[in-house]
Image (cartoon, grey):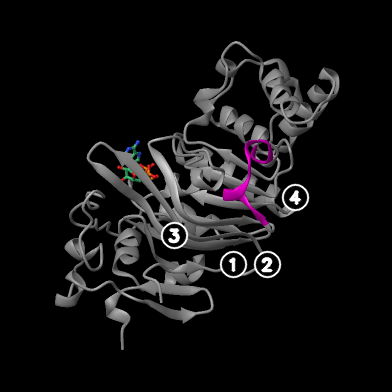
Amino acid sequence: MAANAIATASAQPLLSVRDLRVEYMTPAGPVCAVDGVSFEIGRGEVLGLAGESGSGKSTAAQALLRLLRPPAMITGGEVIFDGQDVLAMDNEQLRQFRWSKMSFVFQSAMNALNPILSIGEQIADAIQAHVPMKQAQAMEKAASLLNLVGIDSSRLSSYPHQLSGGMRQRVVIAIALALDPPLMIMDEPTTALDVVVQKEILQQITELKNKLGFSILFITHDLSLLVEFSTRIAILYAGRVVETATASELFHSPKHPYTKGLLSSAPSLRGPRGKLVGIPGSPPDMRVPPPGCRFNPRCSQVMAHCRTEEPKVSTFGPHHLSVCHLHAP
Ligand SMILES: Nc1ncnc2c1ncn2[C@@H]1O[C@H](COP(=O)(O)OP(=O)(O)OP(=O)(O)O)[C@@H](O)[C@H]1O
């Protein structure tokens, strides 16, 4: 079996990603930031993607909508959305696909709102860029989108600087939902906000998801947030999926030493605060990843063959896979 775990959907898959490979062509040679990543997202599911900084989360997510620019190149794999082969689409097909089928909330997107346009105008512009519509009708739709994300429509004429960080982020989410996409990718959507506002926004997104039925790919390095808001979670380490499970299984019964390390270094948002234990060392230089298991230099349970042989996938349940030599019979 491949060295990467496949996160299979628990519902009928809307998105299926197989063996995705993305390289950055640097002057010093190619850096394989995403190395054979596979996962599925079911309809109405939230797939959480976690991993330390540099593990390849954003690169993988942007590859799904083909938002990457050189020196990044998708060098292998398959991205199938509702039967459509995204990697085979031409520019016009991509233009129609983006935002109407899959939208993207970027890290710090709230700071990218145009300071000289009202938020109503910005939401209306986003709608009109994809659907021909009169201005008055687009503003009406903008008002209902604002209400949807918990902002009174009287704020339509407000400018970004007149809104709090949390409200600006809600505006960005309203824009991402404007065309009713079946999948929304959220890359660290609330990282810049304080913990209370973060939770409020994520709770509201969950309610919207339940009401409207869309799916979410939720990316963050904060595993405690993922556990709370995801259906399933895939853990990335050095460009590969090392463990995938339902949120509850991952939290209560993690198998991979890296997942255990991440959990013990994540401050819990529920219950009493435990002692936080970090993972020693840092992620590898992706120009020269270590041979064998990529986590071996940092693993407290490392064995001799971890340094030379790639681990295989072990299965612990229908949705629980881990890639580690410790599980081998
Ligand atoms: N323009 C670039 N040129 C070369 N390597 C890059 C470039 N951009 C990213 N990388 C490398 O790709 C790898 C994955 O980066 P990526 O930003 O996808 O990780 P991430 O998990 O999203 O990190 P973060 O949480 O910090 O956003 C890293 O090792 C990074 O050094």
Q: Is the N terminus in the top left, top right, bottom left or bottom right quadrant?
A: bottom left
Which residue type carries mark 4? Leu
Q: Which residue position is annotated with label 4? A: 212
Task: Point out the tag, 3 or 4, that comes first from the N-terminus.
Answer: 3
Which marked residue is nearer to the observer: mark 1 or mark 3? 3
Q: Which residue position is annotated with label 2? A: 12
Find out whether residue 118 is within the magenta segment: no
Label 2 neighbour load within 10 Å: few <14, some 14-19, many 20+ = some
Task: Using the image, determine if residue 84 lies above or below residue 163.
Answer: below
Which residue range is magenta in the image?
84-94
Task: Point out the tag, 1 or 3, that comes first from the N-terminus.
Answer: 1
Q: Which residue position is annotated with label 1? A: 9
Q: Is residue 269 visible?
A: no
Which marked residue is nearer to the observer: mark 2 or mark 4? 2
Marks 4 and 1: CB-CB under 8 Å?
Answer: no
Side of 24 where 186 appears, left or right: right
Which residue type carries mark 3? Val
**Local secondary structure at mark 2:** loop
Find out whether residue 91 is within the magenta segment: yes
Which marked residue is nearer to the observer: mark 3 or mark 4? 3
Ligand 1 located in image quadrant: top left
Mark 1–mark 2 Cα distance, whole angstroms, equals 7 Å
Side of 211 where 320 appears, left or right: left
Can you tell which mark lies on residue 37? 3
Task: Point out the tag, 4 or 1, that comes first from the N-terminus.
Answer: 1
Task: Point out the tag, 2 or 4, that comes first from the N-terminus.
Answer: 2
Task: Using the image, determine if residue 129 lies above or below residue 204.
Answer: above
Q: Residue furthest left?
A: 304
Q: Nearer the viewer, residue 61 or 48?
A: 61
**Local secondary structure at mark 4:** helix
Residue 12: quadrant of the picture: bottom right
Image position, residue 296 (x, y; %): 20, 66
